[in-house]
Amino acid sequence: MLTYTTRRSLIFIPTLFVLTFLLYLSIEAGPGDPASFLLGPDVPTSEVQRLRHEMGLDRPLLLRYGAWLRQFAMGNWGYSMLDGASIKGLLLTRIPRTLALMGLSLALAVVGGVLLGVISALHRNSVVDNALTFVGLLGISTPAFFTGLLGILFFGLRWGLLPIGGVGVEPGLWTALRHMILPAGVLGFRTGAEYLRYTRGAMLDALSKDYIALAHSKGLPVWRVTYVHGLRTALIPVATIIILGLPSLVGGSVIVEQVFSWPGMGTMLINAARGQDFPVVMAVAVIVGVALLVSSLLADLMLAIIDPRVRLG
Amino acid sequence: MEGATAEGARITWQRRPPLLERFRSSKYYQSLTWITATSIIFFVFVVAVSTCAPLVAPYNPSTVNLKERVAAPSAQHWLGTDNLGRDMFTRLLFGTRSSLIVSIGGVLLAGVIGLVIGAISGYYGGLFDQIWLRVSEIFMSFPSLVLLLVFVAVMGPSMLNIIVIFAITKWATLYRLVRAQIFSLREEEFVEALRALDIKFVSIVFNHLIPNTLGPLAVWFTLEVASGIIQEAGLSFLGLGIQPPMPSLGNLLSAAQDLRILRDYPWLWIAPGLAVAFITLAINFIGDWMRDVSDPRGTR
Amino acid sequence: MYQTHAAQDERDLTMNSEPELLSVRNLKTYFHTYRGIVKAVDGVSFDLRRNRSLGLVGETGSGKSMTAFSIMRLLPAKTARIEEGSILFRAQNGETVDLTKLDPFGSRMRGLRGREIALIFQDSLSAMNPVYTIGFQITENILQNSEVSRKQARDLAIELLQQVGINAPEKRIRQYPHELSGGMRQRALIALALSARPSLLIADEPTTALDVTVQAQILRLIRDLQRDTEMGLILITHDMGVIAQTVDDVAVMYMGDIMEYGDVYTVFGNPKHPYTIKLIESIIPLGSRGKELQPIAGSIPDPLQLNPGCKFYSRCPWRQPESEQQPPPMIEIEPGHFVKCALYAR
């Protein structure tokens, strides 16, 4: 297994470099110069010049890029172009909020989507199945923010059941949860719909395989054939899809955060994109990129654990 | 023992039945359901109407009429008016039009890029292939919205830019598809025969690659257009897509960010939202149908 | 009922007159598709005793696999149905039960599957679950169908793997299906089928996915195992050479019907049915260079539009006019040798 991990890491590293290089080019392509973003707004020009020279920003492109990377790696993530705030500080408060929202959405989506997908597959072509399939299609076709708006309209404004945005002033778990239910529910519904479709497909596919007939021919009880042989094997592609779908979950959470004014990384990214605040965009993009690469690495490991065919690959 | 009729060694072909009969017995017709057929009709209708929006719309989308601001739906204004007195129905038509232009245009461009690079990559291999493979991996694994946001931040939002950005973010999946197809074609013996005869790469692409890839290509196309419509709606909603005053389904929806409008003037935003949902739903049904035809695994 | 006891004794005097293990009578399995009814098995009858083997030979689509699945009651529930006929099986407790009357997933039928009737699948790779080890899949069968402990099941599995000719069985049981070669996997599949000591073994094209050298080994293995355990064996294949060297009796199937039936030497040595004759003619023996290929003229008719008469009518060089509409009778032209053809009705 060790060789498997090492081999995957080899792809991880150059991809990361290419990503950050592309992003650095974006910074350079925009207004202002990189050094000033590393020091913040209250620093005299002479300081900026000195840093520039120190970092070697007056040297060829690749070296400039390398200098910036080194700064980033050392923990200097720069300052916002728009309001001069420390990016790292901002991120440290916002990342946990985004993680909480994404976590809850993912949990809801996995439990709801996979469960309903299995039910849908087991009762194929019945009323339940048709209804669930339609709900699934509806879920992936309706943009999350529209569902969000509808949610705000009904649950928040008309019926006054849930808060309509923000994270609440009172501290405490219950307040946070109340504010998270609607956005997480909306995002979870959207993502869960995808999982429902995939699980249904994977389950139907697995159940049509020869080894299911073999399992029946052993005289095993039907539940055992369905779950131990069918579902277990179907979960492999489903797990893969879930992991591969994490990037779009990030995208979805960005929009949902905006709709519900949830002060997470998403709203930060959007404001930065609107204002062409490149250092912020870059920092967020790098964080997201690294997080995703790490999670796909973990996913590969997990896949190797649950699918023996992958191990020797 | 099976196959064409062989009396002695003579093979007799039967006359090809007329087009309608061939269609009726083809797999396309067999797996057609009422929903899919309705979706196709609906989608064609929407495309037709929105393309002819300038001819069909009752008003000009930018005509401001401050005397009739935020009017509820009525006989003169089927969907009411917005905060500047512009007719919402017209704006919906034009909005659908711009959303469709951007999505279909972007996907078409992505398709051309993916096809060309994929074909060359798969056929010639080598360093070119390795490089583009890695590049495609990046574009495929990065969250599309973040990628879109990054490019919009860099390039600035506009209809043309969005088309280009869509092309940049969507080509990778088709690239992989085409590349895989060319790989399998390369193994086929008849391609070796063609190479021996020195038939050019271009001819192989047109005469063999494309016909074989049509199925998955059509599925890819429909699904990417569907996701494109949602992405455009999202971007424009955030103010990072098609810029006002030009209407798009997304920026019509962004009006709802104002809580007053959300609650009191539902006609302003529910219609564009439903439009996005229904159009995407229809495209998804069509895409599912195409997938059923080209990937018959009987799991539906 | 056309297999008479007299014919049986005449052929093999040393055999005790045991009752039949399996007695299939007029089995009809139809598939109801949205385009029409496909008569996959259309009136098949045969008998099988313990320690005897029957080969079902025919082209693809002849219904041989479907016959096997009908016996095992493993047909796709929504589209396939046993319309008529009976499958009488003599269970190990002495009772004779009609399998067509049982609920396919009820406890009675499940109890018979694996424990008394076993099936060997054609493609060993797709037949085994890729996420479980060989050992797991074999012990699962043992534990389901016999009262032994887990450890005993494991030891039994190792022993079985040894018996089927797999070396280093302790290592193999911890391996996954894709880690074994095709031949070994097929052996493992055979071990699995035998692991609960069935009295009836059905092998569906067990060697088709293997290369020729391995084929011979597997066939010999099956035959030896059958002799050792005195099981009844039904071997399904399209390869007549395989039939000729492995089984005692043969039934030649075409489009869901048995065309000719009898012991293998008689049928192959003295084929009577036009289809059988054509089949044998189309095989090219080694060393016959320069001879033209002799395919059977015509192609398989559309299964949705069969004429009510003889299924082979459209391709038969000796077709009798009345056979187009009237199904031909099954004639016993010699003791124990049956042909379904109007040619012999005079």
Image (spheres, coloured by chain):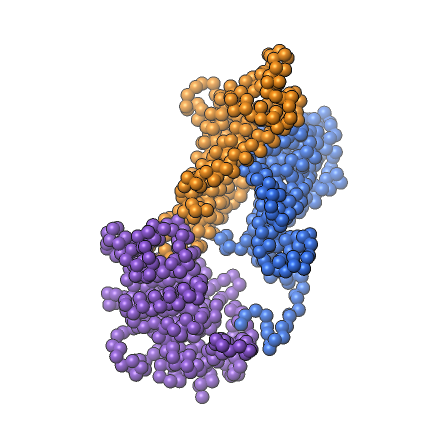
Chain colours: A orange, B blue, C purple
Task: From the top left corner, tell me how far across and down residue C47 is, in percent.
Answer: 34, 74
| Of the pair A248 and C87, the residue shown nearer to us | A248
- Would you identify the image quadrant in which residue B253 lies? top right
- In the orientation shown, which residue stands out farthest toward the right? B55
Residue B243 visible in image: yes
Q: Give the side of residue C213 with respect to residue B45, left or right.
A: left
- Marks counted in the figure total 0
What's the residue at 49%, 66% (across, down)?
Answer: C37
Q: Give the side of residue C321 with respect to residue C95, left or right.
A: right
What's the residue at 36%, 75% (across, down)?
Answer: C249
| Of the pair B33 and B88, the residue shown nearer to us | B33
Query: Above or below — where is C244 with respect to C199?
Result: below
Q: Give the side of residue A157 with respect to residue C232, left or right.
A: right
Task: From the top left corner, tell me how far across and down residue C52 is, in percent.
Answer: 32, 73
What's the residue at 60%, 12% (across, down)?
Answer: A42
Task: From the top left corner, tell me how far across and down residue B221 is, in percent.
Answer: 62, 46
Residue A163 visible in image: no
Task: From the top left corner, tell me how far across and down residue C275 is, in percent.
Answer: 48, 78
Q: Give the side of residue A183 with respect to residue B28, left or right.
A: left
- Would you identify the image quadrant in which residue B160 lies? top right
Query: Above or below — where is B151 with respect to C264?
Result: above
What's the residue at 50%, 39% (across, down)?
Answer: A244
Query: Above or below — where is A235 with respect to A253?
Result: below
